[in-house]
Image (tube, helix red, strand yellow):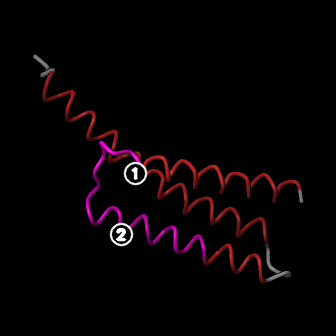
Amino acid sequence: MKIESEKAFRVKSLSKDILEHLMEDNTSYKHEDLKHVIEMLARSVSDLVTLYTDREGDHETALKGTISKMRISYNVLQYKETSKQVRKQDKYHPQP
């Protein structure tokens, strides 16, 4: 049960990180990227509902899958923000 609790807290932490990225005013995302993030988060919610309602399932594996989907969402947001910063840096500090 301890492992499940740790993984559940990881899900919560990732959701907070995703919200922080989405709430930043100075960052904009492409429609396709947000669609991908929404899909992964919807699948995560579905996994969690299945986990909650299915007492006999493999909870550890289900939580691992949920965490993976949430990390994909987080990485999509993080990558877009990082690549935007790199492009700005290259624009203002061209390499010789």
x then y, percent, for residue 13: 64, 49
At mark 1, the secondary structure is helix
Q: Amino acid at mark 2?
A: Lys
Q: Is residue 79 above or below residue 65?
A: above
Compared across the picture, whether 46 is left or right of 54 comes to left
Query: Do the residues bearing badges 2 and 1 touch, measured as CB atoms within 8 Å?
Result: no
Q: Amino acid at mark 1?
A: Leu
Residue 30 lies in quadrant: bottom left
x then y, percent, for residue 70: 55, 59
Mark 2 neighbour class, 10 Å CA radius: few under 14, some 14 to 19, many 20 or more: few
Residue at the (81%, 56%) spot, across then down: 5
Q: Which mark is residue 77?
A: 1
Residue at the (73%, 52%) spot, across then down: 9
Mark 1 neighbour class, 10 Å CA radius: few under 14, some 14 to 19, many 20 or more: many
Q: Is residue 75 above or below residue 87?
A: below
Q: Is residue 84 above or below residue 63?
A: above
Q: Is residue 31 magenta?
A: yes
Please report the bounds of the magenta region as a residue range.
Answer: 23-45
Q: Which mark is residue 35?
A: 2
Residue 96 lies in quadrant: top left
Furthest toward the top, the residue is 96
